[in-house]
Structure formats: C-alpha cells, structure tokens
Image (spheres, grey):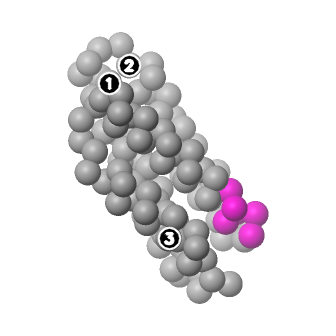
Amino acid sequence: MGYAKERGKLEKLLTRIVGLTTYEEKSLANLVDSHEKYSHTVRILKNKEPDTFGDLYKNELQEVKESRKAVKESDSDEARQHNFIAYKDSIVKALEKTIKTTLETL
C-alpha cells in the first residue's frame, strides 16, 4: 500500500519547521500547527496500518505532547528557549521516523 500522499504532507511539515531556532510566538504557533497536522496524519496512517504505525502514534506523538507541555510550563525565557528547541527536535524526529516508515512500507 502506498503512502505518498501522507508522506508528502509530512515532508512539507518538516521543511516548514526545520529552520526554526528561536522562541517567538509566531515560531511556537508554527510548531503547534505542525504538531497538530502531524497528529492528524499519523492517526490516518495508524488507522490504515495499525501494526506498522501504531507504535509511532503512541510513542512519538506522546513525546511531542510532553515537549509541548514543557514549553507551556516554562517559567523563564532561558527555559522556554531550551524547551522550544526540544519541542522542535521531537517533532522533527517524529516526522523523520514516520517518513522513513512510510518509505519502508512500500
């Protein structure tokens, strides 16, 4: 089963966020939007192939959610910047892992 459509969405999200390096409201909004779109896409994949994408849905998405929560709960600018980068990195890692899985599932 091909996953080109979903993979295309994920690749577009990846290119959209890979250059974000500094915490700003606009950058955070961009990450949150990408997180929500990733969540939707990985849910579609999980529903199509639960055995292949179920762990990604459960594990990777949970890690992204925890990173987002850490950004929201940061009490200083320094902590917020650090957690912002961790949030971005967790989304990038999840996107890359999911893209790789779609390529291997052909």
| Marker disc for residue 74 | 2
Marks 2/1 in contact by CB < 8 Å: the verdict is: yes
Kindly identify the amino acid type of the residue bearing the numbered disc 1.
Arg
Q: Is residue 96 above or below residue 72?
A: below
Q: Which residue is mark 1?
A: 80
Q: Earlier in the sequence, mark 2 or mark 1?
A: 2
Disc 2/disc 1 C-alpha distance (Å): 5 Å
Would residue 97 be visible to someone looking at this image? no
Q: Considering the whole magenta stretch, tell me its main secondary structure.
A: helix
Q: Which image quadrant: the N terminus?
A: bottom right
Disc 3/disc 2 C-alpha distance (Å): 33 Å
Q: Is label 2 in a helix, a strand or a loop?
A: loop
Q: Which residue is mark 3?
A: 8
Q: Write down the region rendered in magenta.
A: 43-48
Where's residue 82, x and y in %? Answer: 28, 31
Would residue 43 be visible to someone looking at this image? yes
Alpha-carbon neighbours of circle 1 within 10 Å: few (<14), some, or many (≥20)? some
